[in-house]
Amino acid sequence: MLTSDDKVLPDNYWKKVVFTFCMGWTVIWVYRSMLSPIYPEIQDTIGTQSNSAMGMIASCYFFGYTAMQIPSGFLVDKFGQKKILIPGFLLFALGVVAIALAKSITGIYVGAVAAGVGCGSYYGAAFSMTAQHVPPRKKGLSTAIVNSGSALGMIIGMNAASLLVKSMQFPWQTMVLISAGLIFLQVLWFAFALRSTDKKGESNPAASAPAGGIRTEESDSDGSIFRPSLLACYLLYFTTCYAYYLIVTWLPNFLATERGIKGGLIGLIVSMIAVTAVPGGLFFAHLSDKKRGKKSRIIIFLEISAFALITVSMFAPNALSLSIILLLYGFLGKMAVDPVLISFVSDKASKSKVATTLGMFNFFGMSSSVVAPALTGYIIDRTGSGVWGFYLGAILLFAGTVMFAFFNRGKKSTAA
């Protein structure tokens, strides 16, 4: 049933929704990527810390973010996207400000948890609103466009932190406060651009259909969100995110301490991932929309490619070869596989449990972001090198791909 608000929405309102949530991911990823290049400068303020202690900063944020995935979905269904999104992002901004004002590692941890809890309101609101308003034939490409905000934010966060703090010698708190300002501006845009609705996912009859308007034969015969084929998808996303967040949080430090790369060049090299992530995501999302019955094969190809590139990156002899590898990882890695995986999981979900299934899917993926930064820091402390941490990420990714291939081999989508 259409709400009174939905009846007067312009035909192109869905484009504003896509733009809004693309910018939301941009702001989120500016924060997520800006701290790792400036860990040494942070320690100049709060004192020398172990690698595992510094890795815990990211883990604290992702703990708060992950813990909110299921509750935020419930709150969005009960109160509406806008009513949860705006307070959540205000808390996000306050948490980031708390990090800038912190005088100890404990204070940074508290701010990071608060930022994560506030940011945790985003996924449920963004997913339900795009599902509600984006036309079914545009969902695959729209998902890729929204996800491209992650790449843009990563480019901005990595390079701005490296430039302002390392090259221009600004205090590290300057970059953090800039991030907080961007989050607050995003709150104002949410308030201005988004329309409130009374029911989530019900105003558009297509909202209950997955991206592309297709489903698997298995979807309606078994409504469980924990059947083996879906569990394999959850596990694959856990390992995909583990490898990705390992790179985002520890590669800058690895380049500085073990490869001798200094200054702004660190942010430039790591941001190579994001440069090709946008065209990669758009290309494979479009390909999966055209080859609907071969999504699992596309996913397996992308995951095996990512495994190979992460492994080879440890042998890169210089900055140029590493940049080339990271460019390829951007095109073939997590940001490229995300829209295809989301579409694949949506196809397999029961009609009445699409949002719940995707919420569980994202919960598994983001759980890895809690584990990867701290565990990698512990491995560095124990071994004196980050190489074994990257090898572990590659091994987990390969194992997750094998499990996915076993339980989803030969699965084809059919028209709903």
Image (tube, helix red, strand yellow):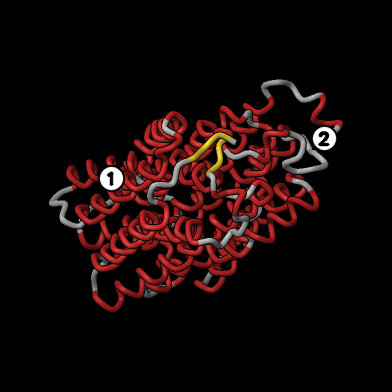
Of the two numbered discs 1 and 2 in the rendering, the one whose residue sits closer to the viewer: 2
Which residue shows up at 19% across the image and 53% down it? Answer: 312
Q: Amino acid at mark 2?
A: Met
User: Which quadrant of the figure contains the C terminus?
Assistant: top right
Q: Amino acid at mark 1?
A: Leu
Residue 304 locus on image (x, y percent): 29, 50
Residue 101 shows in the view: no
Q: Which residue is mark 2?
A: 1
Q: Foreground residue, 159 or 254?
A: 254
Circle 1 packing at 10 Å, graded few (<14), some (14-19), many (20+), is many
Toward the top, the furthest residue is 11
Query: Going by the image, does 379 lie left or right of 324?
Result: right
Residue 194 shows in the view: yes
Q: Which residue is mark 1?
A: 326
Quarter location, residue 99? bottom right
Q: Foreground residue, 80 or 30?
A: 80
Residue 354 locus on image (x, y percent): 63, 48
Q: Is residue 29 above or below residue 48?
A: above
Query: Going by the image, does 212 lie left or right of 92?
Result: left
Q: Is residue 106 above or below residue 269?
A: below
Residue at disc 2, secondary structure: loop
Residue at disc 1, secondary structure: helix
Which residue shows up at 52% across the image and 34% down it? Answer: 140
Q: Is residue 196 above or below residue 173?
A: above
